[in-house]
């Protein structure tokens, strides 16, 4: 059962990293739109 806990932990870490990446990407796009920069 230790392996299951490790897998669950890794899935949680990946999910958090993906969420952070998505938020940064969205904020970056919003910032470009606000400042009028073309991507």
Image (cartoon, rainbow, N blue to C red):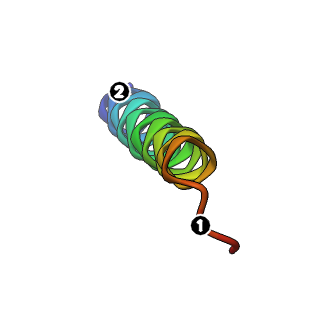
Give the secondary structure at mark 2.
Answer: helix
Q: Quadrant of residue 22?
A: top right
Q: Residue at x 43, y 46 (%)?
A: 24
The nearer-to-camera label among 2 and 1 is 1
Q: Nearer the viewer, residue 12 or 4?
A: 12
Q: The N terminus is located in which quarter?
A: top left
> Total label count?
2
- Local packing at callout 1 (Cα closer than 10 Å; few below 14, some 14-19, many 20+) is few
Image coords of residue 7 (percent x, y): 45, 39
Which residue does the numbered mark 2 point to in the structure image?
5
Q: Give above or below for 15 relative to 38.
A: above
Which residue ends up furthest to the right in the rendered image?
A: 38
Q: Residue at x 54, y 51 (%)?
A: 25
Q: The C terminus is located in which quarter?
A: bottom right
Give the secondary structure at mark 1.
Answer: loop
Image coords of residue 21 (percent x, y): 47, 50
Indicate which disc residue 3 carries.
Answer: none
Which residue does the numbered mark 1 point to in the structure image?
37
Image coords of residue 34 (percent x, y): 54, 41
């Amino acid at each position: 059962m230790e392996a299951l806990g490790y897998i669950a932990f890794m899935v949680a870490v990946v999910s958090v990293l993906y969420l952070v990446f998505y938020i940064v990407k969205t904020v970056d796009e919003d910032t470009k739109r606000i400042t009028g920069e073309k991507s």
